[in-house]
Image: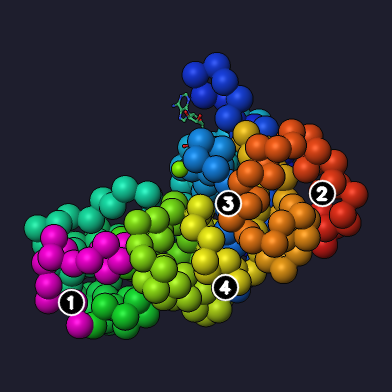
Amino acid sequence: MVLMARKLHVVLGGNTIVRNVDFSIEEGQLIGILGPSGSGKTTLLRALSGFRPAQKGRVVFKGRDLYENFEDLKQSIGYVPQDDVVPRSLKVERALGYTAELRLREFSPEERKGRIDGVIRALGLSQSRKQRISKLSGGQRKRVSVGMELISRPELIFADEPTSGLDPALERSLTETLKKLADQGRAVVVTTHIMSSLDVLDAICVLDEGQLCYFGPVDRIKPFFEVDDIIDIYSQLQNKPVDHWQRKYERSGLRGQYL
Ligand SMILES: Nc1ncnc2c1ncn2[C@@H]1O[C@H](COP(=O)(O)OP(=O)(O)O)[C@@H](O)[C@H]1O
Ligand SMILES: [Mg+2]
């Protein structure tokens, strides 16, 4: 297990935003956190990555307590926020170059260039490497955002809604790229509310009102929520209280296999 979280609890502004959430991911996996807007996906992602620790609960990364060893472990974790922080006036190559200078201080210029070339290849950005970021499509810009995090070769990558705003074809292609990054021996966690590329994911975690309703394989999610179309999960979450899904999940036997 690369990352294991138990009983995460986050309170913000006096409200419980994440309640008792467990999470696990192994090397090679791409896991999606799915849930309606406001269900706590971003808050959970921050807690799992250690960038904004949960008040209660534990996160273990590579066998060590993430919160207690964050300064040491954060080198191995990449976090791509929902809002791009890429410098738009720069060319792709230059933006990655600055990131490499910041994060790989001990590297020679040749070594940094090798790293940048590798990232550009991995993300399919070769055609755009000399382009200004402001001129890129949303999907390409998101790839640059992911690329900036890949420069330091993290073993664990979090991306908050990386495919939001993309059309279905671009969404699919970025999701497949993220799966490839996982296949190369990383663990990748994404939040999403887009539904068309779920089959690429190794597992899905469904959150509602900050609570875990489902964590398991993609092909069991439709029968679990008793829907024919995945989009109807959201109405099912509204139709029945969170407790209903939690009890159903506990009875399903999936916890023992996936968490
Ligand atoms: N700093 C904060 N203080 C109080 N409430 C917050 C804060 N940040 C987020 N929230 C609330 O927490 C809930 C979950 O937010 P968020 O994690 O952003 O959900 P999602 O990413 O699923 O849309 C929302 O109701 C939001 O208003
Ligand atoms: Mg969010």
**Does the segment drawn in magenta span residue 158?**
no
Q: Which residue is mark 2?
A: 249
Of residues 144 and 109, the one nearer the viewer is 144
Mark on residue 200? 4
In space, the residues marked 3 and 2 are separated at their CA atoms by: 16 Å
**Other-residue count near label 3 (Cα within 10 Å), few / some / many at <14 / 14–19 / ≥20:** many
Q: Is residue 66 left or right of residue 178?
A: right
Disc 4 marks which amino acid? Answer: Val
Point 45% across, 72% down: residue: 172
- Does dot 3 land on a helix, a strand or a loop? strand
User: Callout 1, which amino acid?
Assistant: Arg
Q: Which residue is mark 3?
A: 34
Which residue is denoted by mark 1 in the rendering? 129
Classed neighbour count for the residue bearing mark 4: other residues with Cα under 10 Å, few (<14), some (14–19), many (≥20): some
Residue 187 shown left or right of residue 79 in the figure? right
Q: Which residues are magenta?
A: 127-142
Q: Is residue 237 left or right of residue 129?
A: right
Task: Tell me the distance, in whole angstroms, between the alpha carbons under discs 4 and 3.
Answer: 14 Å
Q: Nearer the viewer, mark 3 or mark 1?
A: 3
